[in-house]
């Protein structure tokens, strides 16, 4: 199998990892946290939005779909905002490690809550984007995959514009550079951080609404997509958005390549872990060198 | 109208680093705090701006108790703190630093005019500036915010003597426009010359509190105060 085909096979997953990786990178740069509960809030938004169906049953299908997605985005943004508020209120001085550890706790809490609320079966989300966008050879590239890549690019570009070209961006960078100094100048650090949590949470709500009905997507397997997302973000060192997007696509392609042979298909879930370990070792290299000197 | 500190105690790590300090900075006046390394000067300013909490005592701005307010709330009341050691925003350019704080173009231009050296670096990220230029940026962005009370911890740090000399009348001008100024300086003479009031802090306690001129005029008094006698 050649590289193009591997890319095509892994593209949909890879684009999704890229989007999640971009969200993780944004939050890491702007709010000093590696947010492991990122995808979970999106899944909650999407699954809870289904509960609106009895209320809007009278409307046309398109309207129902739009309302459901909007509700998913808002609910995800709200849950994310609450988590962000907790971090900004009680852990504002804490290290990135401590702040991230709290998101692991909220991840575990959201996973068990999702079992209680939604069980272990995929939920009947409305289909948003179905079928292939185009074919490469005889491999179909799905619309969902294309949408995820476009979303990752759009989020990346919009972020770049906001951060580098607007007064809001000056504030965000000041907080990211030196939080205390920003507070002393009257910058609303808490408001900005909660805002970032809400926006990224909302994007994840949209993302979960789109992917939620594509595969055998139950809550837990969607929530744990944060692991390959982390692998993608690590490729960009949690700083570089273009590299993160490339990282996501590469992880997807590697997985795609493995599915070519029945004997290696089982290994595909290990690819993200492998990438994570490799990058952590790669980063250690310098420190080991420094210590050795 | 004043910034008032009453019997403040600040604990840090093992024990109190400020024990029972009182002072009052009126709008339009300059107070200079001097004292040896480790005396607690920085800790005192940090407790005023809310970086660290006070253990007991009172802090007021114009009669309003502020010790329970957040850093931001204190800042919005007009209390601005220039921290010791050039706390720059590395990625922000000079222009962005001032945009962050200036509420009008006039405030921006006025702050900028105090530091003509920065003009040619206006679109450079602060991290690429020299130490002295960075200190100018930190001061300029705070001046541009039009503080009502300003606390400056070791303004002289990294600045060429001629720049520091030029800033002394600037600070006096800011005070004359109705701002309360609290300066902390290691090397006291110039800062004392600009000031109306002076405090000497040693080991967390005030060992002299009175007119700055008196302290300046009496070398022995200054030396004894430093030694905590
Ligand atoms: N982050 C900290 N944690 C614990 N103790 C601290 C901390 N910072 C300062 N101290 C202690 O508080 C005391 C006062 O320090 P502070 O920095 O306020 O002194 P200073 O008068 O500003 O000194 P300098 O002139 O050197 O700047 C010192 O004994 C110092 O060891
Ligand atoms: Mg100090």
Image: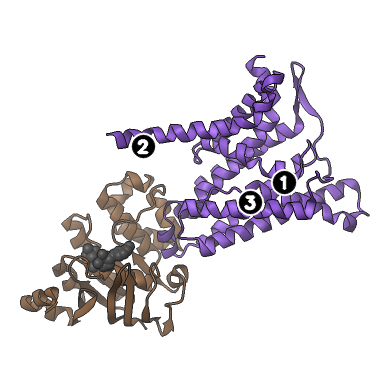
Label 3 or label 2, whichever comes before in sequence order:
3
Q: Indicate the chain coloured brown by its letter.
A: B
Tell me if mark 2 has few (under 14), some (14-19) or many (20+) residues whose alpha carbon lies within 10 angstroms of its own.
Answer: few
In three-dimensional space, the C-alpha distance between marks 3 and 2, rounded to whole angstroms, equals 31 Å
- State the residue position of label 2: A287
* Position of residue A226 measured from the top left corner of the image (x, y, whole percent): 63, 42
Q: Is residue B217 left or right of residue B113?
A: left
* Position of residue B19 measured from the top left corner of the image (x, y, whole percent): 28, 79
Q: Which mark is residue A107?
A: 3
Chain for disc number 2: A
Q: Indicate the chain coloured purple by its letter.
A: A
Question: Farthest left residue?
Answer: B220
- Do discs 1 and 2 belong to a common subunit? yes
- State the residue position of label 1: A206
Tell me if mark 3 has few (under 14), some (14-19) or many (20+) residues whose alpha carbon lies within 10 angstroms of its own.
Answer: many
Depicted B125 relative to depicted B77: above or below: above
Tell me if mark 1 has few (under 14), some (14-19) or many (20+) residues whose alpha carbon lies within 10 angstroms of its own.
Answer: many
């Amino acid at each position: 199998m050649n590289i193009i085909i591997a890319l095509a096979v892994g593209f949909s997953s890879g684009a999704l990892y890229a989007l999640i990786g971009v969200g993780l990178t944004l939050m890491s740069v702007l709010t000093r946290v590696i947010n492991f509960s990122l995808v979970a809030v999106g899944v909650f938004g999407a699954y809870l939005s289904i509960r609106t169906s009895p209320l809007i049953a009278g409307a046309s299908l398109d309207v129902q779909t739009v309302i459901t997605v909007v509700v998913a985005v808002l609910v995800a943004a709200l849950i994310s905002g609450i988590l962000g508020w907790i971090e900004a209120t009680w852990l504002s001085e804490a290290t990135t490690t401590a702040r991230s550890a709290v998101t692991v706790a909220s991840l575990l809490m959201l996973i068990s809550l999702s079992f209680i609320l939604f069980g272990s079966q995929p939920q009947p989300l409305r289909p948003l984007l179905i079928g292939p966008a185009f074919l490469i050879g005889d491999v179909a590239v799905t619309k969902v995959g294309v949408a995820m890549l476009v979303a990752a690019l759009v989020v990346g570009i919009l972020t770049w514009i906001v951060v580098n070209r607007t007064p809001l961006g000056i504030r965000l960078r000041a907080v990211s550079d030196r939080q205390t100094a920003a507070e002393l100048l009257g910058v609303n650090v808490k408001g900005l951080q909660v805002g970032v949590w809400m926006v990224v949470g909302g994007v994840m709500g949209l993302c979960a609404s789109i992917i939620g009905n594509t595969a055998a997507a139950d809550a837990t397997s969607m929530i744990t997509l944060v692991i390959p997302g982390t692998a993608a973000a690590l490729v960009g060192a949690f700083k570089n958005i273009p590299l993160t997007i490339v990282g996501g696509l590469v992880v997807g392609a590697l997985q795609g390549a493995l599915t070519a042979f029945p004997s290696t298909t089982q290994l595909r879930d290990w690819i993200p872990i492998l990438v994570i370990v490799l990058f952590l070792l790669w980063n250690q290299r310098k420190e080991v060198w420094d210590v050795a000197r | 109208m004043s910034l008032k500190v009453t019997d403040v105690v600040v604990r840090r790590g093992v024990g109190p680093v400020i024990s029972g300090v009182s002072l009052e900075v009126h709008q339009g006046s300059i107070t200079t705090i001097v004292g040896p390394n480790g005396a607690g000067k920085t800790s005192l300013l940090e407790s005023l701006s809310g970086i660290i909490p006070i253990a007991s005592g009172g802090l007021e701005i114009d009669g309003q108790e502020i010790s329970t307010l957040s850093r931001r709330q204190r800042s919005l009341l007009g209390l601005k703190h220039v921290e010791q050691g050039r706390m720059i925003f590395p990625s922000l350019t000079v222009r962005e630093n001032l945009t962050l704080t200036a509420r009008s173009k006039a405030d921006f231009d006025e702050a900028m005019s105090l530091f003509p050296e920065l003009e040619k670096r206006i679109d450079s990220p602060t991290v690429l500036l020299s130490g002295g230029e960075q200190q100018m940026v930190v001061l300029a962005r705070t001046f541009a915010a039009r503080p009502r009370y300003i606390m400056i911890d070791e303004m002289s740090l990294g600045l060429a003597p001629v720049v520091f000399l030029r800033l002394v009348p600037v600070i006096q001008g800011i005070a004359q426009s109705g701002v309360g100024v609290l300066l902390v300086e290691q090397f006291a003479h110039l800062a004392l010359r600009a000031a109306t009031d002076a405090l000497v802090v040693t080991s967390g306690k005030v060992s002299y509190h009175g007119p700055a001129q008196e302290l300046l005029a009496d070398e022995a008094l200054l030396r004894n105060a430093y030694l905590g006698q």
